[in-house]
Amino acid sequence: MATAVAEEIKPNSTKEKILTAAIELMAEGGYTGASMRKIARKVGIRESAIYNHFRNKDEIFQTIMKNLFSNPFEDFFIKRPIEEYAIKGKAYLLEYAATIKLLTFDSKNEKFFRIILAELMHNQQVRELFMQYFYQENIKKLSNAFFIMMQHNLIRSADPILMAQEFFAPLFYYRLQVLLMHIDNKPTTALSTIFEKHVDFFWESVATQESF
Amino acid sequence: MATAVAEEIKPNSTKEKILTAAIELMAEGGYTGASMRKIARKVGIRESAIYNHFRNKDEIFQTIMKNLFSNPFEDFFIKRPIEEYAIKGKAYLLEYAATIKLLTFDSKNEKFFRIILAELMHNQQVRELFMQYFYQENIKKLSNAFFIMMQHNLIRSADPILMAQEFFAPLFYYRLQVLLMHIDNKPTTALSTIFEKHVDFFWESVATQESF
DNA sequence: GTCTATAGAGAGATAGAC
DNA sequence: GTCTATCTCTCTATAGAC
C-alpha cells in the first residue's frame, strides 16, 4: 500500500537482481509462473543461493508488493493537495488523467499492473491492496475534488462518490485495454488520445453552463 | 465466443461431472489450480479415468470456454434487435444495465467471469475472447444504439464509440467490484443499486433538454 | 555467499489388467 | 469405463562442503 515503506535494497546487489528477475517473470506468468528455478537462471546463480537473500518465494513476492506500492511517482500523485487543485475544474481532471496515462504507458508501472491483475483472483492480500489502492484511495481523493467543484458551482450537483467512480472507471478500463494490447504486441495508436477524450466527454457531461 | 456452438453433453454423465468439477476448481484457482488430481477427487474417480473423456487438461479448458461463451442467456442478450429498442432511450440503457446486473449476480456467470479474469494474463486465447466479447461486441452494439439515439435527438451528439465505451466501462468496473467482494465474502449491499445509479447519472450527462 | 546434492511433494500423462 | 501402477517432469526447500 502507499503507506508502506520500501525496503533499502542496494543497487546491483544479488538481492536486487533477484527482485528484478522476479518482477519480470511474475509480470509474464504470475506468481506460479516465476519459479525459483527460472529466477535463479535469470540472475545467473543456483536456486539454493536465492535462499541466502530471501527466506522463501513468498518473501520475494511480499518485497515486490511493498516496493511497487510505494512507488515515488504514485506517492507524489496521491499526496497532491486536492483543495487547491480541484478549483481548477477541468484542468485538474486533465492532469489526473494524464498521470494515469503516464502510469499506463510506463514500463515499470505496466509490469506492476500486470502482476496485480495476474494475482487478483488468486491472492487475497493482492485483492486488499487492489481495492484499497484502485478503489478507496482514488475514489476518496476524486470525490473530494468533485465536492469542491460542486461548491464552486463548476459542475452540476450529484453524489460526489458516484461521480468519482464514473470518472475513474473508464480510466481503469482504458488502462486495462492498453495492457492487453501490449501483452499481445498489438498497436495502441487507437488508444493514444483516449484518456484526454474521456476528460472532454466527462467535463461536457457535468460542467455547468457558466464553467463550460 | 458467442457464435460457438456448445457441445452436446449428457446430464449426469461422468463427462458432465468432470466439467462441473473443473469449472468449480478453475473459478477458485485458475487453470493451474484445477489439477487433474483435484478434479478426479471431486468427481470421485481416478485421474486416469478422466482421459477416457478428454484427451488432456487443455481439452477440458477448451470445452468449458466453448460452453461458457455460448451461454443462452448471453446469446439472447447479444441478439436483441437494437434498432427498435434504441429509440426508447433511457429505458434501453436501463434494460442493458439490468442484464449486466443479472449476469453479475448470477452464480454461473460469476464463475465464468472469474475464470476469464484468472486466466486473462496467462492465456492469449482468453484475451482474444475477452477483447471480442467484453469490448468489441458490446461496444459495437452500444455505439449503434447511441447513434440511433443521436439521430432521434434523444441525446447530445458525440462520437458514438466513445460514448459506448464511457457507458460500458463503469458497468465493467462495478461488475469487477462485486466479484471481488464476493470472493472474500464481503457484503455487496452498497453496490446493489449502483447499476441503476450509473444509468441515471449517464442519462443526465447525455440527454438533450427535450428528452430529459 | 555460492555451490552440489538431495529430499519430498505435486503435477500431467500413459500402459495394461479387469 | 474404471482401476492400479508407473513414468517423467517441475516445483520449493534444506543440508552441508567450500
Image (spheres, coloured by chain):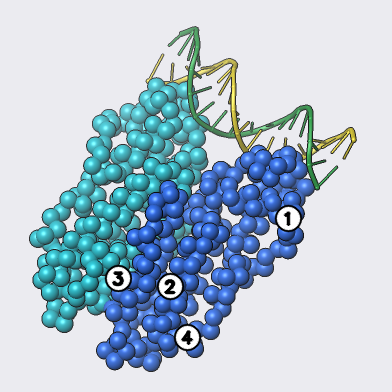
Chain colours: A cyan, B blue, C yellow, D green
Which numbered mark, 1 or 4, is in the foreground of this view?
1
User: Pointer 3 indicates a residue of which chain?
Assistant: A
Q: What is the CA distance from the residue labelled 3 to the residue labelled 4?
A: 26 Å
Quick one: SS at disc 3? helix
Q: Which residue is mark 3?
A: A198
Q: Residue at x 36, y 75 (%)?
A: B199
Q: Secondary structure at mark 4?
A: helix
Q: Does residue A193 appear anywhere in the picture?
A: no
The earlier-in-sequence mark between 1 and 2 is 1
Front one among B76 and A207? B76
Q: CA distance from mark 4 to mark 2?
A: 14 Å
Label whose residue precedes the other's in the sequence (1 or 4) = 1
Q: State the image quarter where residue B5 is shown.
A: bottom right
Of tags 1 and 2, the one toward the viewer is 1
Mark 2 belongs to chain: B
Toward the viewer: A141 or A70? Answer: A141
Disc 2 is placed on an element classified as: helix
- The amino acid type found where label 1 is placed reads Asn
Could you say which quadrant of the image residue A143 lies in? bottom left
Nearer the observer, A103 or A207: A207
Pointer 1 chain: B
Q: Is residue C3 left or right of residue A128?
A: right
Among the two numbered marks 4 and 2 on one chain, the one whose residue lies closer to the N terminus: 4
| Residue B38 visible to an observer of this rendering | yes
Can you say whether A44 is above or below B181 in the image?
Answer: above
Disc marking residue B97: 2
